[in-house]
Amino acid sequence: MKLTVAIPTFNRLVQVTGRVSELLPQITPDVEFIIIDNCSDSSVEEYVKNNAKNYNFDRIKFIRNKINVGANANFMKCIEHCSGEWLWILGDDDPVCPNAIEIILKQIEDLQNIAYVTFFSSAGYGIPGEYSTVFDAIDKVDFTNALFISSSVMNRQLCGSYIRYGYEMIGAQAPHLAIKYAALYNKKCKFIVSQERITLDHLVENEQQWNQLRVWTRLLWLLDLEFLSFQEHKLLAKQMHAWFFNFKTLILMSIRTALSVEAKLLSESTASKFIDELYFRQKSVRSVWMFVPIYWLTLFFIKFPSAAKLCDRARCCLKKGRTGKLEPLPKVEHRV
């Protein structure tokens, strides 16, 4: 088996059915297709078979966990159940290109000593080429794209040997990065950055978006990887800081904080402690000049939640590229 396409999923029946409809017409005899259901409330297998009709489901291997092991551990399950030479872990909400599997098979054909291939995506970019060090893996690929698990395929033999690093970094929100970095360090192999794309742009709904603060604090675990050199450690920390502390992220966070207060998902006192903590973190890295306006903007949005609603709706309209009647704002759960 040349390639395994694995979709880890939990309670996203509609989304995973969409991926099945997109992928099944592309599946070839050299491709294994598995879906790992992380103990969803309703059976993913039954829902898909009832709603994605006119397909041969014999090509899909459904696996259901007996208990919910968590999102990151479910990613690791994909590696354990993979039987192909290469593995593509695909997010259940990430639409794929009509010829995605063809692109991947062409890219990985006859590759030797390559640990993984990273493709371009809407999440970020990379500098096309072939590289061989952990430093290059951090430096040559935009950190947002590196986090985006659907943008790369891994060599099961070269990367699968280091699955223990993924489990050690299970709380880091990006265990796949720990595995890739470990493979590059220990196997002395290479990786490729391709200009091709295998996923399509899509709008992530509010309730499906990450809690940026929680993700950022968990990503710091990656800095504990024992094999990172001083320069690699420094560059990785810089990439994380640049990814989190930017105007776009902080403005979005200020809007969501205010909306969570209005929806009583977060008290005003808790929100104040939340932004005070952010301010403290910024002060410690000497980037207060960028954070101060965001700090006051958050306070403004908390006092005037209607302004936060207006900004969030405008953002959604601009991102969808349309104008006209605004849809009701979905409820957002924001925990800190």
Image (cartoon, grey):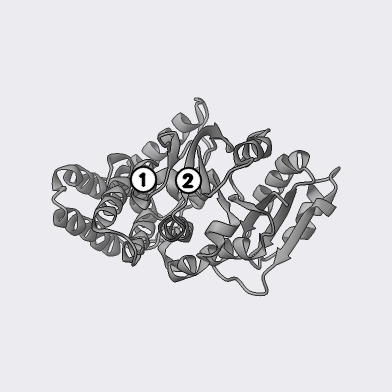
Q: Residues within 10 Å of mark 1 (few under 14, many from 20)?
A: some
Q: Residues within 10 Å of mark 2 (few under 14, many from 20)?
A: many
Residue 172: image quadrant is: bottom left
Q: Is residue 34 left or right of residue 139?
A: right
- Residue sitting nearer the eye, 243 or 277: 243
**What mark, if any, has residue 198 been given in the picture?**
none
Q: How far across and down, in percent of the image, does residue 187 sit?
A: 46, 58
Is 30 above or below relative to 174? above
Report the number of numbered marks. 2
Q: How far across and down, in percent of the image, does residue 98 sit?
A: 68, 33
Which badge, 2 or 1, is on the more N-terminal residue? 1
Determine the CA span between mark 2 and mark 1. Answer: 9 Å
Residue position for label 1: 136
Which residue is rendered at x = 69% and y = 59% of the image?
A: 83
* Quarter of the C terminus within the rendering: bottom left
Residue position for label 2: 191
Is 157 above or below relative to 28? below
- Residue sitting nearer the eye, 153 or 244: 153
Q: Is residue 80 left or right of residue 136?
A: right
Which residue is rendered at x = 34% and y = 57% of the image?
A: 216
Amino acid bearing label 1:
Asp
Amino acid bearing label 2:
Phe
Q: Residue furthest bottom?
A: 66
Q: In the structure shown, which secondary structural element does the residue marked by tag 1 occupy? A: helix
Q: Is residue 296 left or right of residue 96?
A: left
Instruction: Confirm or deny contact between disc 2 and disc 1 (CB under 8 A).
Output: yes
Q: How far across and down, in percent of the image, does residue 298 sit?
A: 26, 48
- Residue sitting nearer the eye, 297 or 3: 3
Q: In the structure shown, which secondary structural element does the residue marked by tag 2 occupy? A: strand
